[in-house]
């Protein structure tokens, strides 16, 4: 049998005191930081889970930023299209009045001048910008309709002109936020009376027919104008649908952020009430252990001489 020496008792006592002090320091760190996990060794699995949840929150924050930017972009687009629609409706009123054949040439000339001004207003709306970017020029980011190039569209169109925002993981969550305005406005007329049949071409022809007093041609112009109004309304519907999708995505992301934040809190945050009780208990136990150890381990003159 081994004899329990004073040195063995001292070592065991010091070890136990160290363990109690470590527990007390850990609880104190939890209280000061509010976190249950202050270092990976506290809970390796919990640490891994916290890293995953923080990564998800970072992705959700990025997606939410894209949604907000896309929403602002589509709202700017919708506002410009609404302005165009108001202008085109005014042109339609003028065409209907002029087509009845009761206006004299002076009135028709005045109407033609107003149509010209309204046409320039439409082009101005097409040159609208958002955050320094022309919203109707595709990825080219140049002024779509410039004074030097007349009615010729300067942006790009087609698949390569799509401006997209990623609002979630996967290709299906990539949303196109821009509108190809060339589908509506076109590039005007290459020569008097010769154009692409789109809105700028029709507006130029309306002005020319009013100026020439050709009331009969204005009936055809009205039909062409109505066709372009239908295209305009189709673009507005598409933009509205995109806005709705972005708003739904925003709500979904906010819900995911809330639930993920809650899961992260459950994983790494400390129960402050329970931690406070633990701290009081461990502090009392450590103090009692110090007092008991002082009585158990008695120092002698020989200890000091050694």
Image: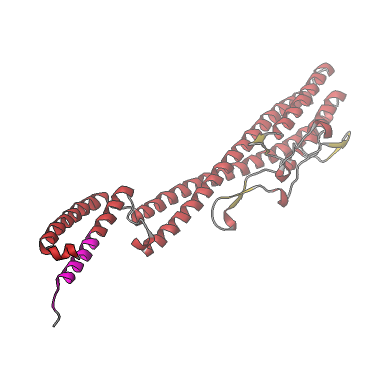
Residue 7 percent location from the top left of the image: 18, 70
The quadrant of the image that shows the C terminus is: bottom left
Residue 299 versus residue 109: which sits nearer the camera? 299
Residue 204 percent location from the top left of the image: 82, 31
Q: Quadrant of residue 229?
A: top right
Residue 80 versus residue 17: which sits nearer the camera? 17
Residue 158 percent location from the top left of the image: 73, 49
Residue at the farthest bottom position:
1
Residue 203 is a magenta residue: no
The residue segment tinted magenta is 3-20
The quadrant of the image that shows the N terminus is: bottom left
Q: Report the residue at 44% width, 51% height from top.
A: 256
Q: Quadrant of residue 181?
A: top right
Q: Is residue 280 found left or right of 72 in the rendered image?
A: left
Residue 75 versus residue 292: which sits nearer the camera? 292
Above or below: residue 146 compared with residue 271: above
């Amino acid at each position: 049998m081994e004899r329990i020496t004073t040195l063995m008792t001292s070592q065991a006592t010091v070890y136990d005191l160290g363990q109690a002090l470590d527990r007390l320091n850990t609880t104190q760190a939890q209280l000061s930081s509010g976190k249950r996990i202050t270092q990976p060794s506290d809970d390796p699995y919990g640490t891994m889970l916290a890293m995953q949840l923080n990564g998800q929150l970072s992705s959700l924050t990025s997606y939410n930023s894209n949604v907000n930017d896309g929403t602002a972009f589509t709202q700017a687009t919708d506002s410009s299209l609404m302005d165009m629609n108001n202008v085109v409706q005014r042109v339609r009123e003028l065409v209907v009045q002029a087509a009845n054949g009761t206006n004299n040439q002076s009135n028709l000339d005045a109407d033609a001048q107003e149509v010209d001004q309204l046409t320039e207003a439409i082009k101005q709306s097409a040159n609208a910008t958002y955050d320094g970017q022309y919203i109707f020029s595709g990825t080219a980011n140049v002024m779509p309709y410039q004074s030097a190039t007349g009615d010729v569209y300067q942006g790009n169109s087609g698949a390569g002109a799509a401006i997209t925002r990623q609002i979630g993981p996967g290709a299906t969550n990539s949303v196109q936020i821009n509108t190809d305005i060339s589908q509506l406005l076109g590039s005007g007329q290459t020569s008097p009376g010769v154009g692409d049949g789109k809105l700028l071409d029709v507006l130029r022809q309306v002005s020319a027919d009013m100026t020439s007093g050709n009331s009969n041609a204005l009936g055809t112009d009205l039909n062409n104008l109505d066709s372009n109004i239908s295209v305009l309304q189709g673009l507005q519907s598409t933009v509205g649908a995109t806005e709705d999708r972005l708003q739904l995505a925003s709500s979904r992301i906010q819900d995911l952020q809330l639930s993920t934040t809650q899961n992260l809190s459950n994983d790494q945050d400390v129960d402050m009430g329970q931690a406070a009780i633990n701290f009081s208990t461990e502090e009392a136990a450590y103090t009692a252990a110090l007092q008991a150890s002082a009585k158990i381990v008695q120092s002698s003159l020989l200890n000091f001489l050694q």
